[in-house]
Amino acid sequence: MQALARAARGILPATAAAPAARVQQARGIVVHVKDGNLERALGVMARKMRSSGIERLIRARSQIHHHVKDSEKRVLARKALMQRVRSQELGKKLRDILIKKIRGQ
Amino acid sequence: MHSLPPPAAASLPILLLLRRRRRREVHLCSGSGDTASEERRGGGEGVRVRPGLGTTSKPASPPVPLDPGRAFSGDLTAMASRRLFASLLRSTAAPRTPSTPGCLFNRAAAAAYSSSAPYNGQGFPLPQSETASRLGLFSSPGDTRQPSYGDRLMQSQQLSQDYRARTQANNAPRFGDTMSRIAGGENSSYFGTPSRIFDEHKQSLVKGKRDFVHVLLKRNKTFVTVTDVRGNKKTGASAGCLEDRKGRSRLSKYAAEATAEHVGRAARKMGLKSVVMKVKGTTFFNKKKKVILSFREGFRGERVREQSPVVLIHDVTQLPHNGCRLPKQRRV
């Protein structure tokens, strides 16, 4: 790195850098295809993207196309929470009804 | 009449006596003033006489000779005194005539003195002096005249030449500045060198002789381009230039897949061996997966057993982490 810095200042000419420095880290998600199995590679990539959270960002970005204020975000979060709770309660009710029917038979 | 002395030759004591008598005569002049007033009264009487003569000639004749007689007597005395004064004045004026040429002589002498000043050389530099030699460049020591126009012109030209020489001397450091600027320009060439080193990443891929397939998925468009390692385009297609879907809607779900298949077929014809897929687009992964599989189908064609040319899948989507504020949405 010192050699590069000196070259940048114009003091000494640039010299051949170490082999490790030549490989630059790539941005984004990279998946190698081994033995020509494309289906497996695509599956690995899907898993990587889902875990990294980029899918969620893309979904949010696709739904909302304008700037959202922090206050608005809080309101939306509260609505989502209430909806989730309501859906859970509904699920429980359905499960109980089914159990009763099965036991009744 | 007895009181007035007869005129005599001019002399100093006589002049003094005349002065004293002049003072006495001044009093007499005041008396003559009274006579003048009497004459005025006589004029008034004359006016009265004229209508009297017109009316009656005999009674007017006796008073007329009396009044003019009195007037004549007064006038004669006054005129005599006046004549005496004039003669005395003339006699007194005569001795002054010799003094006037003396004054003129003095003035002439003064003029001579003033005129002699330039001859003495007081106002001009003396001959054979330093000032005279300094004034004229080509003046001889015996030459008293001032430097001519030509000499002055020569001096001014020499002065201007000296000034130019000084200005040229002052320009020397500026030339040095330009040299330093050139050196600075040469230094700037070094800054471009480090950027070449960071291109090694691309050069390392040349060994494998791989080609890049850039897939750009947008909301209503799809671009698939095949390039070499250095970015030169080999072939490519877009959803809008496909012959199959010329007259149809481009918003179809299968537009992207069709484009990828088309490009895959073209790549097959070109004889590509190995390919690196670079996918870019703010869409869900399912769509990207379909595009990649379509490319493989197009490349493979009828042969099912052949392996796919894809060696590497690289998702290069750039998504800001809560970046700039998005524009305000239009209210419809």
Image: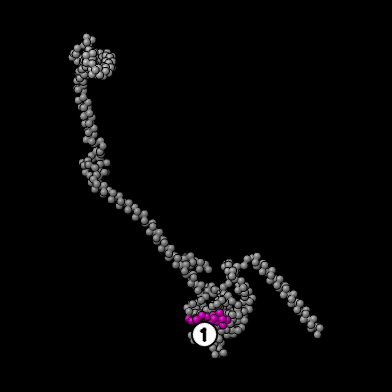
Q: Furthest-front residue in view?
A: B55
Say what secondary structure mark 1 lies in.
loop
- Left or right of B79? Residue B231 is right
**Percent x, y of residue B199:** 50, 74
Chain ID of residue with mark 1: B
The picture quadrant where one finds residue A89 is: bottom right
Q: Which residues are magenta?
A: B234-255
Which residue is painted at 22% across and 12% down in the image? B62
| Quadrant occupied by the N terminus of chain B | top left
Q: How many marks?
A: 1
Q: Amino acid at mark 1?
A: Asp
Q: Which residue is mark 1?
A: B244
- Left or right of A95? Residue B270 is left
**Percent x, y of residue B331:** 59, 69
State whether residue B212 appears in this view: no
The residue lying toward the viewer, choosing from B43 and A74, is B43
| Quadrant occupied by the C terminus of chain B | bottom right
State whether residue B222 appears in this view: yes
The picture quadrant where one finds residue A85 is: bottom right
The residue lying toward the viewer, choosing from B74 and B49, is B49
